Amino acid sequence: MAPLASVQGQVTALFTKALKDAFPSIQQDALVTKGNPKYGDYQCNNAMMIFKEHGAGLGFDSPLKVAEAIRDSLPPSKLLGDISVAPQGFVTVRVSPEWLSSKVGECLLKGDISYLDLPRKRVVVDYSSPNIAKEMHVGHLRSTIIGESVRRVLEFCGHEVHGLNHVGDWGTQFGMLIEYMKEAYPNFQDQLPEVHDLQEFYKASKKRFDEDADFKTRAQLAVVDLQAGGEFARSAWQKICEVSRLSFNRIYQRLNISIEERGESFYNSMIPPLVEELKAMCIFTPNISTIPLMAVKSDGGFGYDSTDLAAIYRRLFVMRADWVIYVTDLGQEQHFHMIFDAAKQAGWHRPPLTRCDHMGFGVVQGEDKKKFKTRSGETVKLGDLLDEAVQRAALEISKRVEEQSKDGGEAFLSNPEEQMDAAQKIGIAAVRYFDMKQNRTSNYVFNWDRMLDAKGNSAVFLFYAYARIRSIQRKAGIDVHSIPSNCLQVKHPAERDLALKLLQFPDVIEAILGDLHLHHLTDYLWELCNTLTGFYMKCKVLGEEAQSCRLLLCEATRKVLLKSFQLLGFTPLDKI
């Protein structure tokens, strides 16, 4: 199958050629935007500016005349259908239905959908990053699912992507925890506690550390022993990490996350030689902050700054990454820009040859616009949140099955096992989609009703759209792959709208590559499913002369939906 290419990009290339041919003495980028659907699909907006700046010298008496010159210089292309010029100077083009028919068949119906972002890059995406000895909570949701989807988008574009989990697995807190567990849970290395027990032990150890001077001394010695590779301390630390890792992996399995653990401890041995190479205890980044990065703390130890410097060094200098992306909350934005600046000063980060991005995100809020908490004021555990999403989805499914039974229709999910499988998929997809449809940098209010609204902009609505396509395909009783792609002849305006919307999928991918905002994809899915609804209302699929063409359009839509779901981490249902 031919890789997809941006429709707007192709139209822009045609206008770029037209501008160069019409006005060879003027250097100007083609300004192409989506047009008013009443007049066309795309419009070129250069004529007014050219007239203002060069009109008299070029002999033009109006923007209209400039626009006509641009139109007349457009190179011949099968892509272009009707071309119109407005008195204000807008040149509007409509994509030809023949080109749409050909490209949907060529790019969406033959094999897997593909897209190439060249040149191919080696990319590191740093995301999720929970802390050892603590349960994952709602604060980890955004980094985990946003990071995973960005990783998937970049892989889809043909890049070599390394998803890394920078877990908090090192530091003074482990001395406190190990020393406390020696007293309170002496056999913990043989009988591993659950991670929620570790979290309670951590709280208790912190209290002891703050209140008991003798315990504080022993905890500090335990840290020294751990850093020196002491047998007991190292074994205890590994057991604590093992318990936490099992807990994290249960969440990652539910969310279908593929990530490689590369915690803080991984970089320990790299820090001393790195500090020696930098020949600096602290690094100033005056363009970012007046506070320096501390490569070495005042007590001679190493902290978060040291670890993050070692991490970016390894990623840019050792792994030879072309692009490094950090997915954390916006509160850490300045810190990471300081790290990028320090890497630039050290010669590891060499823009534009290398690119470093911080994908900051806002906070998940409750209805009170404060950080999302339980009724008792506790932080919401991520596992509990996913459980509730599945429970609520199961309730909605059982109501739908009951309604189908009352209406005398077929209950597609009559089997309890099928219902639970559907609840798992819908519930978790609803949480993911609701999060990712937000502007990444904004805070948002968590709302179960909107999340599971079957008629609103939700994963549930998208799942129903996908299931409806599958239902039509089952009723047709035809293997859609047996229909020749040349049967796809777009004629009806609603067919044309759907074909054009399908071919705009790569424009969405390009937008994500530009600014790393995933809501471009969720917005597109909402628009696509509404365009599909309009298509159904105006174009009966089965039993019509155009049945073959419309079945192919339905299959192309299914494939774009499926690819988009995969990028967002969803698994759709054929029946709901």
Image (cartoon, rainbow, N blue to C red):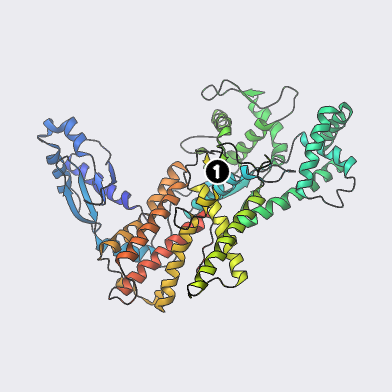
Disc tally is: 1
Image-quadrant location for residue 307: top right
- Nearer-the-camera pick, 119 or 141: 141
Horizontally, residue 348 falls left or right of residue 378, namely left
Image x and y of residue 428, in percent: 58, 56
Q: Is residue 126 visible?
A: no
- Nearer-the-camera pick, 377 or 484: 377
Q: Is residue 101 visible?
A: yes
Residue 519 sits above or below residue 253 on the image: above
Q: Residue at the spot x=83%, y=40% of the render? A: 178
Q: Residue at the spot x=54%, y=69% of the render? A: 402
Horizontally, residue 201 falls left or right of residue 259, namely right
Image x and y of residue 473, in percent: 42, 73
Image x and y of residue 471, in percent: 44, 72
Q: Name the residue carrying label 1.
A: 321
Horizontally, residue 556 falls left or right of residue 274, namely left
Q: Residue at the spot x=63%, y=33% of the render? A: 309
Q: Residue furthest front?
A: 406
Q: Residue furthest bottom?
A: 477
Quarter of the image with the N terminus is bottom left
Image x and y of residue 191, in percent: 86, 52
- Nearer-the-camera pick, 284 or 45: 45
Horizontally, residue 62 falls left or right of residue 137, namely left
- For badge 1, the amino acid type reads Ala
Circle 1 packing at 10 Å, graded few (<14), some (14-19), many (20+), is: many
Secondary structure under tag 1 reads loop
Image-quadrant location for residue 557: bottom left
